[in-house]
Amino acid sequence: MSADEIYDVTIIGAGPTGLFAAFCAGMRDMTVKIIDRLPQPGGQLAVLYPDKYIYDAPGHSKILARNLVDELYKQSHTFAEPEFCFNQQVNSLTSKEGHFALITNAGEHQTRTVVIAAGIGAFSPKMLNVAGSEEGKEGIHYFVQDLDYFRDRRVLIVGGGDSAVDWALGTVDKARSVTLAHRRDRFRAHEGSVRDLFESKVNVKPFYELRAVSGEHKVEAATIFNNQTQAEEELPLDDIIFALGFEADLGGIRNWGMEMDPQQKHLTVNPRMETNIDGVYAAGDVTEFTYLEKQELATPQQFVGGSELSVPSQKFEEQKERWGLIVTGYAQAAVAINHAKRFISPEAKLAPGHSSEMAPATRTQTGS
Ligand code: FAD
């Protein structure tokens, strides 16, 4: 598809909710695009707890978060080929002659409907305020996807958590040299990994921090210093991997004209997962879960009319509560997408039918 093609639905966020929404859109024969600030799918599962087991994912007695992401990603290709746009943050949403335009740091996307599955916000890596360490410069890495890239290179890793230690252990047999600088002497990583680290060839530097990066267009060297003694060391380098964690921010979404809760953390949706903007839906952690609570009708005053035909004034009261679960995100994604389908094609049925009676487009990708 060309860059100005108008997609049937564009999903903001490739966490579990967004990935399942992409699957549902494929089932409804919709063209689908999915945009995420991260360079990979998975949202919170990918950046906050990839190696934890999830026990309440339907159909899996237990599954590692990273493996659930792989499965959801594969599943999203079952009935369609979603277009994934990674490393893009959606900064604005505007209405444009019968469709919407989404503006990201990399360009503009046209779409008939939008499903916001933004979770707790766009994830971005925590950065150090050290000149020369900006994202995008050659040799500066805030995400690691291909460990082979570091073959025969001189690498500095900054951080002391699981990612820092895992990347050090993952690169040490490929790289020419690996140094790990951590500002404390205690590591937050898994005990076994820390033991492996100290037994490996990684040059571990506790109490060391980054002071400067040199090299105009690409990394050439770094100055690190001991925060106890202030002693400095100059390391000739090709790459610096920052593993300082992530922060999430809903940012601009708050200014897109959508109703939110008083804390400005969740989008207000009705049971169809519609926001107050027609054609814009939301699902997953970014919403509050709406449920109906039965009211007590004990006293006669709660009836109107005053005759035998009196009816309860109100039997159920709408309540909202945050669940923050993968499984509720799935259900909300399905509801949002099917209403989006109806929005585009009013004659279409709301219910998607049974997937078991449909023919997958790409059986190999689903592993079936
Ligand atoms: P997210 O996973 O937050 O994904 C949202 C995505 O949207 C992110 O990738 C983000 O970068 C992207 N995004 C946001 N805004 C933008 C934007 N403007 N432009 C581009 N991209 C954007 N739940 C369970 O059900 N079971 C568990 O066992 C469980 N364990 C958990 C353990 C931990 C430690 C944590 C933190 C959470 C756990 N959860 C668990 C909760 C579960 O991870 C969330 O409910 C789930 O991730 C919500 O999915 P989501 O797709 O709605 O949002």
Image (cartoon, rainbow, N blue to C red):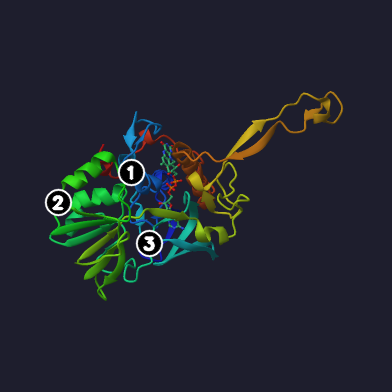
Q: Quadrant of residue 157?
A: bottom left
Give residue 34's position: percent from left, percent from top.
40, 54
Q: Name the residue carrying label 2.
A: 201
Q: Is mark 3 within 8 Å of ligand 1?
A: no
Q: CB of mark 2 within 8 Å of CB of mark 1? A: no
Amino acid carrying mark 3 in the image: Met
Residue at 20% in and 47% down: 198
Residue at 25% in and 54% down: 145
What kind of element bears circle 1?
loop
User: Which comes sooner in the sequence, label 3 or label 2?
Assistant: 3
What kind of element bears circle 2?
loop
Q: Is residue 249 left or right of residue 219?
A: right
Q: Is residue 82 above or below residue 227?
A: above
Q: Name the residue carrying label 1.
A: 50
Q: Is mark 1 within 8 Å of ligand 1?
A: no
Note whether residue 201 is visible: yes
In terms of depth relative to the viewer, which is nearer, 97 or 337?
337
- Counting every numbered tag in the picture gives 3
In terms of depth relative to the viewer, which is nearer, 317 or 348?
317
Q: CB of mark 1 within 8 Å of CB of mark 3? A: no
